[in-house]
């Protein structure tokens, strides 16, 4: 399964995240990949808003993971860019977040590819300027039809 769509602004990327959040459940893992500035944190910000997180979302570059509470689900927002790989991820005990009954959004997911659960939703984000292309594989528990619903609700262009 592969779903591709585009967004035309950071606001639309956030709207997609907010729409997608309706379909997320405890245990959902979303791995994001793309260049610096691709929109990974924008998407996480939209998901956080959609699940009702209390605090504003910032990139967890130097802390590796930020926890957001106050909503219908906990959000665990990772940035694995500075890790040396999946062994570093396991040695840090970060894999325990996968069983904490929240949603895990992982920036730079390819760094820990082998540590990701089997049902991980993977999103590759690419593009220039304001337009971003999302290539989604492995919809996990969310389901392909719900990814398409969220993209449509946010006004994204399905490719």
Image (cartoon, helix red, strand yellow):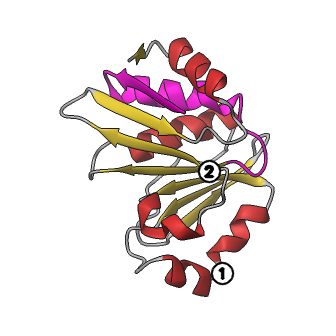
Q: Which residue is mark 2?
A: 120
Foreground of the two, 154 or 111: 111
Left of 89 or right of it: where is 28?
right
Q: Mark 2 and 1 residues: CB-CB less than 8 Å, in contact?
A: no
Residue located beneath label 1 in the image = 93
Distance (Cα) linking label 2 and label 1: 18 Å
Residue 15 belongs to magenta span: yes
Compared across the picture, whether 126 is left or right of 33 comes to left
- Residue for point 36% across, 23% down: 7
- The disc, 2 or 1, on the residue closer to the chain's N-terminal end is 1
Q: Is residue 110 left or right of residue 19?
A: left
Residue drawn at x 69%, y 34% is: 142
Instruction: Note whether 68 is above or below 79 in the view shown.
Output: above
Mark 2 element type: loop
> Quick one: 43 or 136, which is closer to the camera?
136
Counting other residues with Cα less than 10 Å from the Cα at mark 2, is it few (<14), some (14-19), or many (20 or more)? Answer: many
Q: Which residue range is magenta in the image?
A: 1-28
Q: Residue furthest left?
A: 128
Give x and y (percent) for residue 82: 38, 74
Q: Position of residue 52 (x, y in %)?
A: 70, 37
> Which picture quadrant has residue 149?
top right
Residue plotted at (42% across, 16% down)? 158
Q: Is residue 50 above or below residue 114?
A: above
């Amino acid at each position: 399964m592969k779903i591709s769509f585009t967004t035309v602004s950071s606001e639309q990327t956030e709207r997609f995240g907010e729409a997608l959040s309706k379909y997320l459940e405890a245990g959902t893992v979303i791995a994001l990949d793309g260049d610096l500035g691709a929109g990974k944190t924008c998407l996480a910000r939209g998901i956080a808003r959609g699940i009702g997180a209390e605090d504003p979302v910032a990139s967890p570059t130097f802390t590796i993971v930020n926890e957001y509470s106050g909503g219908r689900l906990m959000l665990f927002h990772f940035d694995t860019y500075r890790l040396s790989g999946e062994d570093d991820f396991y040695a840090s005990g970060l894999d325990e977040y996968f069983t904490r009954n929240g949603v895990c959004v992982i920036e730079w997911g390819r760094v820990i590819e082998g540590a990701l659960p089997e049902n991980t939703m993977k999103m590759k984000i690419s593009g220039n300027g304001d337009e971003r292309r999302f290539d989604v594989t492995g919809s996990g528990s969310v389901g392909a039809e719900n990814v398409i619903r969220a993209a449509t609700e946010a006004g994204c262009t399905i490719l």
